[in-house]
Amino acid sequence: MDKGGALSSGAVKKIVITYTYVAIWIFLSFAVIVYNKYILDRKMYNWPYPISLTMIHMGFCSSLAYILVKVLKVVDPVSMSWDLYFKSVVPIGLLYSLSLWLSNSAYIYLSVSFIQMLKALMPVVVYSIGVLLKKDDFKSETMANMISISIGVGIAAYGEAKFDAWGVFLQLGAVVFEATRLVLIQILLTSKGIALNPITTLYYVSPCCFVFLFLPWILVEWPILKENSSFHFDYAIFGTNSLCAFALNLAVFLIVGKTSALTMNVAGVVKDWLLIAFSWSIIRDTVTPINLFGYGLAFLGVAYYNHSKLQAFKAREAQKKSQQSDEESGKLLEKGEEEIGEDKESDK
């Protein structure tokens, strides 16, 4: 800021760029969800083959990630042995493929708005799995908050006008697999000092996702597609859909380091409410007052959880800086004492 308290032109430019990236992320995340719903829903494009759609995404993302990493060298690949790849990346790829398969399948049976409400359970499942695997400490206050989120989602489910038990099972399964994947990333990769950004994640994970999905695709969807002679692959639809999915990961890569975790959480909330509004106003899905009350309760619990995590992170960072400062002060004190000792020796 200058003397008058106004922001400098450089600061304004940085803020504009940051929130432009955030807006792009919200738009792309919104577009991918709505586009997937459009393709899979029987009342819209009517192509209810979630495994095939996920495989198209993984094949497309694998190819573009390879070009960015190996050809254009936009990012550097992570040094990784085959042993580490099979023990750490492959299990994560398996969980990711199951999560994508089930979440895309849920779009056939559930509305976009209700799916977003069910996704509010993600912190509950992540925390529960973290406690079970001893990655997180059990805290009664946190668990009480998790219960409040679960009650909110339960109320939203009770108020759902077009409740489908199979669709709910699929979406909850997707949440469980995704939550397990997030916890295993911390255990298998982060704890070993391996950090993958969204591009290198696609580079390493997408190919094994494609392989894992191939077997169920052969058994479940390929026989139906083979019999459906009327279907012709629409390169425009599936190409733009896959491009949106890849662009979403690229947007995350651009945002990393340019904004805070709090900003991303707020952006995620804005996206969820926009999707609910879009689902109600454009797709004409039914959103009841009980839906909104339940989701509002769950939303408050998730917001409190994210706020608590952010405060804990800031406290850890402050503690690290304090320890580093103490260590530097100790070194300076030791150096000063050594110099005083040397001066006394020279006086003798």
Image (spheres, rainbow, N blue to C red):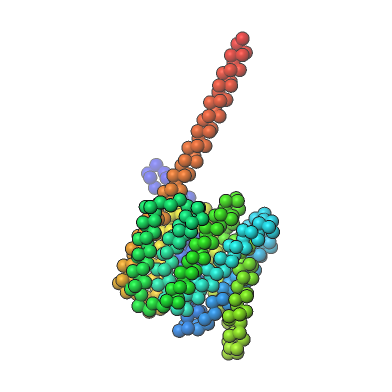
Residue 51 left/right relative to 128: right
| Frontmost residue, 48 versus 85 | 85
Q: Position of residue 281 (x, y in %)?
A: 37, 76
Residue drawn at 42 percent across, 44 percent down: 2
Image coords of residue 84 (percent x, y): 66, 56
Look at the image and tell me in which quarter the C terminus lies: top right
Location of residue 68 by image quarter: bottom right
State the residue in front, 80 or 125.
125
Compared to residue 331, the image places residue 255 above or below, namely below
Q: Quadrant of the N terminus?
A: top left
Q: Confirm whether residue 15 shows in the render.
A: no
Instruction: Say if 204 sits above or below 49 in the image.
Output: above
Whether residue 5 is visible: yes
Residue placed most toward the observer, 202 or 209:
209
Question: Which of the 4 image quarters holds residue 94?
Answer: bottom right
| Whole-percent x, y for residue 272 in the image | 41, 66
Residue plotted at (31% across, 71% down): 290
Q: Residue at x 59, y 16 (%)?
A: 343
In the shown orientation, is residue 12 left or right of residue 101? Answer: left
Counting the numbered discs, the total is 0
In the picture as drawn, the residue positioned furthest to the front comes out as: 132
Q: Whole-percent x and y of residue 234? A: 58, 82
Q: Residue visible at 60% across and 11% down?
A: 347
